[in-house]
Image (cartoon, rainbow, N blue to C red):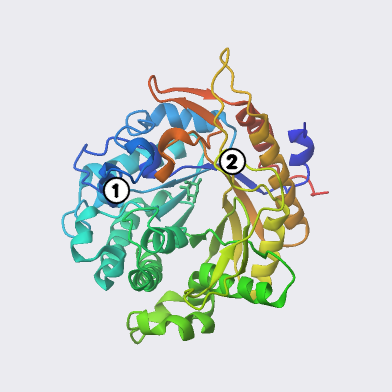
Amino acid sequence: MVDPKTLAARFPGDFLFGVATAAYQIEGATKEDGRKASIWDAFSAMPGRVFERHNGDIACDHYHRLEADLDLIQEMGVEAYRFSIAWPRIIPEGFGRINEPGLDFYDRLLDGCRARGIKTFATLYHWDLPLALMGDGGWTARSTAHAFQRYAKVAMARLGDRLDAVATFNEPWCSVWLSHLYGIHAPGERNLEAALHAMHFTNLAHGLAVEAIRHVAPKVPVGLVLNAHAIVPGSDRPSDRAAAERAFDFHNGAFFDPVFKGCYPESLVSALSDRMPAIEDGDMEMISQPLDWWGLNYYTPMRVVDDPSPKAEFPATQPAPFVSPEKTDIGWEIFPSAMADLVADLYRRYELPEFYITENGAAYNMGVVDGEVDDQPRLDYYAAHLAIAADLARDGYPLKGYFAWSLMDNFEWAEGYRMRFGLVHVDYESQIRTVKKSGEWYRALASEFPKGNHKPV
Ligand code: FCB
């Protein structure tokens, strides 16, 4: 087993270790204190969308167990907590009325973190769009970008004084392609034209929110969390290499290019512009304002080959087989070195600011036996990926910290509660939390920081 202290010694002394969660996945209390439905409440209520029709009504009951959960984070020895703010608690109909009790909850969260010396990394949008906004088309409507700007302003005016960092969006790839093209996540749309509208208006919403945040909370570092895909061609054939490049433009470029270059990838525009919404004057400038940081969520590579069928839509690729025989319980290939190649590739292609690994982790579903959870494979996953993170910091990439996904088992979107990503096990009947073997190991590693007094080796 990798010794956590030996691994810790490989990181710079000011490296930050944290744990991550998201509102809809843990909070529960979906009908309390003025919160109204989000698209995930509606999606979970529809048969056939989420495994066994699980939903976030109770989840980890974090809304009612806030203080105990903050104690748990402190006991994990981490320096920072990444969480998300639920838009439908703050502005329940998306625009219009502001709901004070919703803001009060995040007041308590931030004050509780501060009292325990835990740094706060907030995400404004982790997929819980107020359902009322679907009446206008949700993310396919330009008006939603403006509603998001106002929500960002309201949230940051009240909470910004106690935030160490803020991200506008978590993984636009998921809320755009997975939600509007592949139909796997809420709102479950499967339509390229709708998805392209969601792409542009999500990017615009990001830019509008950056502007609002800089206005009302200028001291808070602003970033964006992207699940950049480590795209690997399934063979060395030129056709498969070209397919991988197209896949890069579609899966990564659709979000990285507008934000970091101020335009959409040429290949995407020439293939799909007839179905994209009108890009208005000033949109691309708004989207491409410089950021203070960005976040990388990495779990697994994406292997692709060319799809030669004349009917294949851009980017015209098909999945290629895994290379490693090892996969996690959710079926994702384990391939840590792809994370290093991905970071190198992104810093070659774009001028990027400093970054955090804002999510990384593994689904393994073993339960509690005699009061303990022996999740050695998760521990091994963390050890392997943290070794890569240490290499990246050593090689000069501006990697400032690492957040484990997740603090505790939670509502894993379309998979419901059957997939467990926590360092801490949650018994959903009793709501008892049990720190897993991986959690103990991560605690030993994280509690070494911040050191500030040793050089990395
Ligand atoms: C990411 C999500 C996060 C969690 C992990 C497993 O895509 O940001 O909420 O579901 O995957």
Reply above or below: 363 against 295.
above
Residue 362 image label: 2
Q: Can the viewer see residue 225?
A: yes
Please state the horizontal and vertical placement of residue 153, each as a whole percent of the image: 31, 61
The amino acid type found where label 1 is placed reads: Phe
Q: Earlier in the sequence, mark 2 or mark 1?
A: 1
Residue 43's disc is 1
Q: Is mark 2 within 8 Å of ligand 1?
A: no
- The location of residue 194, given as percent across then percent down, is 33, 70
> In screen coordinates, is 359 left or right of 15?
left
Q: Nearer the viewer, residue 102 or 349?
A: 349
Task: Measuring from the top left, give residue 380's x and y in whole percent.
Answer: 70, 37
Q: Residue at x 32, y 32 (%)?
A: 58
- Disc assigned to residue 324: none
Question: Which residue does the image show at 69% across and 57% down from the upper left?
Answer: 338
Dividing the picture into quadrants, the one containing residue 107 is top left
Kind of residue at disc 2: Ala
SS under mark 2: loop
- Indicate the position of residue 117 as horizontal and vertical percent values: 52, 38
Q: Which element is circle 1 on? A: helix
Work out which residue is located at the far right of the displayed protein and give it: 457
Mark-to-mark CA distance, 2 and 1: 25 Å
Please report the residue visible at 76 percent of the width from the left and 40 percent of the height from the top: 7
Q: Is residue 54 visible?
A: no
Q: Which quadrant: the N terminus?
A: top right
**Residue 147 lies in quadrant:** bottom left
Label 1: few (<14), some or many (≥20) within 10 Å? Answer: many
Q: Are the residues flagged by discs 2 and 1 in contact, CB closer than 8 Å? A: no
Q: Nearer the viewer, mark 2 or mark 1?
A: 1
Quarter location, residue 77:
top right
Residue drawn 52% across the image and 67% down it: 251
